[in-house]
Image: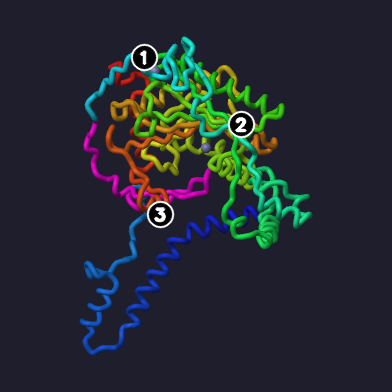
Amino acid sequence: MENVTLQKISIFQASTQLQLLNLTVDHFTKSRIKDVPNSTNSASKMNRVEHLLNPITSTPTYKKMTQEFDFTNHSHRRHNPLTDTYVLCSPHRAKRPWQGAREEVKKTNLPEYDPKCYLCPGNIRATGDANPKFEGTYIFTNDYPAVKLDQPDYIDHADADKKSDYSSDSQTKTSDKPELDIDLNLTIKTLKIAEKSLNSKKSLAQRLLKTQGVKGKCFVICFSAKHNLTLPLMSVPELANVVQTWLNLYNTLQAESLTGSPFKYLQIFENKGSAMGCSNPHPHGQAWCLDMIPSEVSQELINMKKYLQENDSHLLGDYVQLELNDKLRLVAENDSFIVVVPYWALWPFETLVISKEHLRSTQDFSEKHKEDLAKILKVLTTKYDNLFNTFFPYSMGIHQAPLQCEEDVKDVSWFHMHFYPPLLRSATVKKFCVGFEMLGEAQRDLTSEQAAERLKCLDGEKHFMDL
Ligand SMILES: [Zn+2]
Ligand SMILES: [Zn+2]
């Protein structure tokens, strides 16, 4: 019940922020007018007031509008229920007619094999290891991993001392790690009391400088042996091999996690294009396996669990239904998956690939699901490349059930993939998250519906390189 109330309060607070702002502005306006001393020269008085209100134009602002609110013309905020954050939409700025800034077709002819590429079959990598002469998808342990398994455990000495001082704590609290399962099962009230009592015993460093040791394993996945074969240029069976590799890795690590390995979450992703910091054009993705659940995933799981408790249905299951009914943001669809530009998208052509039925992870995939995912990835990435006649850069990744978690957390997980492409108007004009976005909140001009319409109309079968 408290969760429900808190949620309502939070939505209420957010939706009333603008009203409060208006009230403040209104109050400000009136109080300024009232504060001006009586004067016999009313014109001069008003001039002074107007100058205070708007020193540049001297035109009174904050007029009460009588026209209907228009989502394609008036600024508004959209809520992201997965992360419980907002994005500011300024659709009036995207009203300019499309300038047709389609780039010249750049048929970058990369070779099928590059002797200098450390990902091509048979080549020597920087560490001296040689790649086998693989033919399909090839996975190997990253030579320069972000996290490693062979490092000592992190011990917070100050915390350990504290535990010995307060023996009751040491019995109930074994770690400062934000255990998702525990957090979800505690009420907010209990949490707050526990936190307060704990914080009163902590030093400033313990309160403010928190650390966790992180161990893990990183993999590189070459999608293909061919140096120039990106996802949209691969055949459906070749793409199905990539899906199978993701699935095999999940299964292997899941089995290891059940027999004592510390792995909790597998993050599979691809950074494509130099715009996303990818240094090697050989089509490849990555997989990081960690002994913790990363913040973004953890936040989504918490919000999906909350939604399930409040609505008795799954957030992403409901969202699939909504988008299938509305069709306003639907880009592509097959028997098992949909692609949408989410209502709350931040990046201009951001998309979500969501399974239609409840698949918690690739472990729940049938042969049909594998093939359908391969098909929809081919359609989406082909549309992306055809948008600006370029090898469309993006960061994409899979969100699915953690490797180790309680059954109820596993059950709120719903297989989906995020695509975050940076391009805005052409192959060279990209969006930057700067200024207000770094200091205030995410912001976009083009609406999700406008972006979806553009992607929907594009050819999802014939790639511009084949035209
Ligand atoms: Zn290569
Ligand atoms: Zn997600």
The numbered mark, 1 or 3, whose residue comes first in the sequence reads 1
Disc 3 Cβ-to-ligand 2 distance below 8 Å: no
- The secondary element bearing badge 2 is classed as loop
Q: Residue 115: which disc?
A: 1
The span from disc 3 to disc 2 (Cα, nearest Å) is 38 Å
What residue is disc 3 on?
439
| Three-letter amino acid code at the position of disc 1 | Pro
The numbered mark, 1 or 2, whose residue comes first in the sequence reads 1
Q: Magenta segment, which residues? A: 73-102
Q: Residue at x 78, y 50 (%)?
A: 171
What residue is disc 2 on?
150
Can residue 235 be seen by looking at this rendering? no
Residue 267 x %, y %: 54, 32
Residue 229 x %, y %: 38, 17
**Local crowd at mark 3 within 10 Å, few (<14), some, or many (≥20)?**
few
The quarter of the displayed image where residue 368 is located:
top right
Cβ atoms under marks 3 and 2 closer than 8 Å:
no
Residue 97 x %, y %: 23, 41
Q: What colour scheme governs how the chains and residues are painted in the rendered image of this protein?
A: rainbow
